[in-house]
Image (cartoon, rainbow, N blue to C red):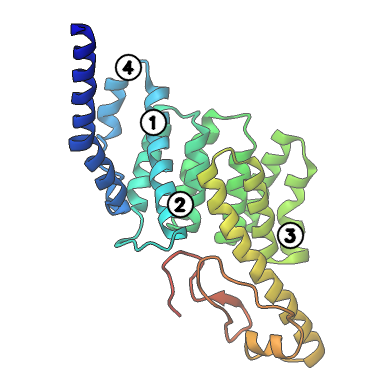
Amino acid sequence: MIRDMASVSLLAVGLLVYLVVVSPFTSYMRNKPIEEKLGFVPSVKLLKPLSADQKELVGASLSMKVLMYYGGVLEKIQGRKVITESPDLLGMSRLLHGAVQLDPYNMDAYYFAQGFLTWDARQFKVANNLLQYGMKYRTWDWYLPFYAGFNHAYFLKDFKKAAEYYRRAGELSGQELHISLAGRYLQESGQTNLAIGYLRAMIASSHNETARKSFETRLNAFEGVRMIEIARDRFRGKKGREPLSVAELLKSGFLETLPSDPYGGQFYLEPDGKVSTTSKFAFGGKTK
């Protein structure tokens, strides 16, 4: 009887603690602005000696912290909730750099850094330096030179350097596609198709739901761009001039339906005919 009463009392205390402490804290963290949740992490100089022989585990935990943080950002955005500040891209970069310094073989860190450092943070040099660092260790991995090749071709327009990285990716993977990818897409289909091919490869190789959703969103946006580009090119061929707007492409029948921008913007044509969007391919970036 006494034992039963003790068990009931312990259960009651546990329930009280949950109601008074755990539940409010969980609710607070759920409603706390997502940009505050990345939190403070000691510098890698301090983490290295503290990690001792657990550097791989600590590096993986830093990567997971970033993935969970950014996953929360995407979840809020896709749920159309207000984010008071932009995602902490610098903090994310710092943690992922720390992760690979602790464990230079950590593929998740390279993969995710490639995603947001280029598309979101526009830090192409930082991304390429990180990939170069990884290539020193992951000498068998064709993904890293594949990413670097894309960065040089698409973002930096350095096609000679891009060809070097694609060639290296081809040598490591044994796939002729990687050797000819830059030239084929750039010469035959243009920059948008290069991006589409790259994003499809990223999605196919992804084993992380957060990263895959981010790339799928961007792929959907670029497929919309490509649809308008095809209509624009057909208009040029028939009319001998640039279309004045996306609306003219729709009205003239060259564009059957208006693709939607998954970032919430509206597609439009620049004066030179380039297809752009008011979102700038970023959540919360509606300016023109």
Res 161 seen here? no
Q: Which residue is identified by label 3?
A: 185
Sequence-wise, which precedes: disc 1 or disc 2?
A: 1
Q: Which residue is identified by label 4?
A: 52
Sequence-wise, which precedes: disc 1 or disc 4?
A: 4
Q: Is residue 80 above or below residue 99?
A: below
Label 4: how many Cα within 10 Å (few below 14, some 14–19, many 20+): few
Mark 4 or 3: the one toward you:
4
Residue 154: image tag: none
Residue 117: image tag: 2
Residue 100 location, quadrant: top left
Residues under numbered marks 4 and 2 in contact, where contact means CB atoms less than 8 Å apart: no
Q: Along the horizontal axis of the image, is 260 left or right of 52? A: right
Q: Secondary structure at mark 3?
A: helix
Q: Along the horizontal axis of the image, is 193 left or right of 134? A: right
Q: Which residue is identified by label 1?
A: 61
